[in-house]
Image (cartoon, rainbow, N blue to C red):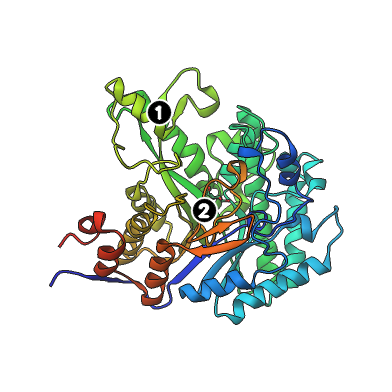
Amino acid sequence: MPTTTHYFPKNFKWGTATSSHQVEGNNHNNQWALWEQQEGRIVDGDVAGLACNWWLNSDGDFDRMVALGLNAHRISLEWSRIEPSEGQFDNAALERYRAMLLGLRHRGIEPMVTLHHFTNPIWLEEQGGWENEAVIGWFARYTAVVVNALGDLCDLWCTINEPNVYAVLAYLGGTHPPGHEGITKRSFAVLRNMLLAHGAAYQTLHQKQVLARVGLAHHMRYFSPLRPNHILDGMTAKFQDYAFNESVILALTQGKWSLALRQGATQSARGLRGTLDWIGLNYYTRQFTMFDIRSSATLFGRVIEPAMLREAEIFGYHNPLKTEISDYNYGEIYPDGLWKLLQRLGRLNIPIYITECGLPDADDDQRPAFLMRHLKPVWLGIQFCYNIVGFYHWSLTDNFEWSEGWRMKFGLYAFDHVTQQRTLRPSGRLYGEIAKSNSLTRDQAERYAPDVLLRLFPT
Ligand code: IFM
């Protein structure tokens, strides 16, 4: 009998993920609010503004999660609301978060709470942000306040979202505040402080909550040499993988600094050993890299944007992408990368959540196939006994996409930030069917992703 249905385990978590600044609206006390005011920082001069208005009303979107049959949501807290000035905590903000978590719980949706997702209170930014080692203690103090106030409503904690992305975009790429370019050393110092802050928060959460389950959302890319048989391209891909992907895992599982993180470290990584009760994987795409002696800031690997691959082809270089580039130049659609990274994380022997996965796709002509093709390796990993326990789609509705503003649309629901109107996309319907049936089926593929039917269900 050909397999026509891939079932997921009974308690599998089907969710969506959001972050405070991207959905709450009216966040004026963090570094992004200031950044958005600077000319040329955000595409089209966009600002987060009212965003999806969750601060005043998140119920409608929570109801939408229920309509899709979801049983989990990854939400983030806005540090600048909870601690608006250094050492001063705002009970009203904590109350609002209590209401949100209760709103999720009452709907049968398990919250995963992220403590830091890219935004810093202005008082912290003014003191050097994550470059200042004092942030480790400040983050632990904030964590203690949060777990005291919200601990009865949440035991699944994600300390920090994508520390590697934060460090790279803010200190190498210059597209996130404070907007530095090519300052490798400071970028590593920031990553190190974020990992140490994770460790401090891990201890705090466990001291205050016996059953806390603490992890972090790690953005991993699958690094590939642009020219597959080129030794130097192969080496730079390995270096970049080590610096971007592996150094975080090495620190938090074995308590060791990678070579890059060791330079200038004043604190040992030993205390970080075993500070992951679970690991979160944020997966979007693969990254091609090419040896370039001038690219010292990126470990001599020049990052090749998907659009450039078409150019590369002209010079006879390998271009495996062909038609697989996402419409918004967000990267290659590469589900195999998810499979390879899951195999790698599977060896850690801790639960794995896919804490983010998604695609900007306003007309939704790629997302349904994207979704099914990325859920297939998740299902397969489970068959291989990897402890994969949940999948959080990025995101529920379109939201404020940082330096890309409102133009990148990641939502299962289309969202018009001017009218605040939400409209379910076909991919949202599909995700709902998957969540409700707790399975991927041939019938879904026939209806939503006929072009990839045979890749999903070959027999
Ligand atoms: O929107 C972001 C999110 O804040 C962090 N991970 C990647 C998403 C899409 O770019």
Query: Left or right of 272: which side holds 49?
Result: right
Residue type, mark 1 in image: Met
Q: Quadrant of residue 241?
A: top left
Instruction: Please give the name of the residue rendered at 64% of the width and 44% of the height, measured from the top-left corner.
Output: 268
Q: Amino acid at mark 2?
A: Thr
Asked if one can make out residue 277 in the rendered structure from this viewpoint, the answer is no
Q: Quadrant of the C terminus?
A: bottom left
- Measure the alpha-carbon separation of dots 1 and 2: 36 Å
Residue 300 visible here: yes
Disc 1 designates what residue? 308
Outermost residue to the front: 419
Left or right, residue 100 beside residue 380: right
Q: Which mark is residue 413?
A: none
Instruction: Check if mark 1's residue and mark 2's residue have beta carbons within 8 Å.
Output: no
The foreground one among 453 and 417 is: 417
Of callouts 1 and 2, the N-terminal one: 2
Image position, residue 123 (x, y; %): 82, 47
Which quarter of the rendering shows the N terminus? bottom left
Cβ of mark 2 under 8 A from ligand 1: no
Of helix, strand and loop, which one carries label 2? helix
Residue drawn at x 72%, y 73% is 98
Crowd class of label 1 (few under 14; some 14 to 19; many from 20; radius 10 Å)? few
Give the image location of residue 315, x and y in percent. 30, 20
User: What label does residue 253 carry, if any?
Assistant: 2
Side of 305 where 8 appears, left or right: left
Task: Please name whichever residue, 52 or 202, is drawn nearer the observer in this view of the structure.
Answer: 52
